[in-house]
Amino acid sequence: MKKGENAVFTIPPQLAYGESGSPPTIPPSATLQFDVELLSWVSVKDISKDGGIFKKILKEGEKWENPKDPDEVLVNYEVKLDDGTVVAKSDNVEFTVEEGHLCPALSKAVKTMKKGEKVLLTVRPQYGFGEKGKPASGNEGAIPPNANLEIVLELLSWKTVSYVTDDKKVVKRILKEGEGYEKPNEGAVVKLKLIGKLQDGTVFIKKGHESEDELFEFKTDEEQVIAGLDMSVIKMKKGEVVHLTIAPEYGFGSSESKQELATVPPNSTLYYEAELVSFEKEKESWDMNTTEKIEAAGKKKEEGNALFKAGKYVRASKRYEKAAKYIEYDTSFSEEEKKQSKALKVTCKLNNAACKLKLKDYKEAEKLCTKVLELESTNVKALYRRAQAYMNLADLDLAELDIKKALEIDPDNRDVKLEYKVLKEKMKEFNKKDAKFYGKIFSKLTKNGTAKEAAAEPMSIDGNGKA
């Protein structure tokens, strides 16, 4: 039924009171009719999927988002036993979802709630306090073993917490949501209000908080600031206010650093409060004409070369990737521009392959060289670098094919010749290991076969020569 719907239900005796009826009101074998109107209903969900926590919404929340495991939630709650005894009550309690609070039911429930939502939870012991219960402490009453609980829980708000780096060593807590969806890209000029503190509260930088203060300005992905701050800012929106916790590896590392207001000791964890006041994005390829795309690709390639020479292979790789993206689609280019574009693509992919070899990402190096060979099938550098990738991936036969082809094209190439020597040594070593491995197997098989032959009795035959 739908809300407000009115219906008549006709119930046969076998689904009602049967042959006995319900004296004195309902006679035996009576067919019943019910006139029903559905005024409203309250949804009750089994949020644990095992009957352990039922959730009934008392007040709807706002929007559609729910807190995630790393987020910090702010809640009110009241806990009662089956008999109505209040055993715990707290307002404005803050906790991290994944760490939980009071009992397992709270963190499971808040992940299903919206901001401002208020619910009644019916909680079985396994999501409450289990077989042991909980003794009274402070303002909280005792909870008996195996007690069912009723919890009224209200989610007031939460701070979105995310990990900027995969190793979770740069943590971003949103204190105030930003505007829209746009975020700075790599190469954007950003302006921030910024306070940086040490663990003991010492302020080592403060910018943009006084009227005469200049905002803190830098260009992203240029190593103008510590890596943790650089990586965090490109994940912010205009007007967003965040608290950042940055481990030493993404801060000033093991070195002491003299900052504007204080010296940061070696191996310091840093704490920043930052507001992204404004940003100007680096021009994207779709906003450029063909001449600008080729110029931008050339500039990024040169930046990549400088970073490669400095041994900064990760950042160099990103520059080469960005350069190649500017000229990825060249259908609108003139014939001359297509020639320039092709030369840049080849150079950027080859240089990027060199970065990937340095970073031991051999599979990606092999893919980049293959893309170059699709453009120029006789490119010796691409064959040489792909052979290096194959060697490190233990595809020695494929490596040999590439080196032989490279030597056919350029028989005097010193680097390729040296690599061929290295390959031959690897193949010898590999063949020795193979021979040793299969020799052991053959030896075992021979021993087992001899033993079986010695143990076997000849099959007897009958007088007719039949087995």
Image (cartoon, rainbow, N blue to C red):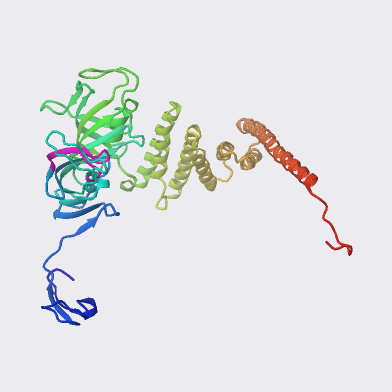
- How far across and down, in percent of the image, does residue 52 sit? 26, 51
- How far across and down, in percent of the image, does residue 341 sit? 44, 44
Seen at 73% across and 41% down, the residue is 442
Horizontal side, residue 346 vs residue 160: left or right: right
**Nearest to the observer: residue 71 or residue 123:** 123
Seen at 45% across and 46% down, the residue is 336
Horizontal side, residue 62 vs residue 424: left or right: left
Work out which quarter of the rendered image holds the N terminus and state it: bottom left
- How far across and down, in percent of the image, does residue 413 sit? 62, 33
Work out which quarter of the rendered image holds the C terminus and state it: bottom right
Q: Say if residue 152 shows up in the picture.
A: no
**Nearest to the observer: residue 271 or residue 234:** 271
Horizontal side, residue 57 vs residue 403: left or right: left
Is residue 4 magenta-colored? no
Q: Say if residue 95 shows up in the picture.
A: yes
Is residue 97 magenta-colored? yes
Say if 450 sits above or below 26 in the image. Answer: above
**Nearest to the observer: residue 214 or residue 462:** 462
Span of residues in magenta: 87-105
In terms of image quadrants, where is residue 272?
top left
In terms of image quadrants, where is residue 93?
top left
- How far across and down, in percent of the image, does residue 239 sit? 17, 39
Seen at 14% across and 38% down, the residue is 140
**What number of labels is visible?**
0
Say if 367 sits above or below 13 in the image. Answer: above
Say if 461 sits above or below 284 in the image. Answer: below
In terms of image quadrants, where is residue 96?
top left
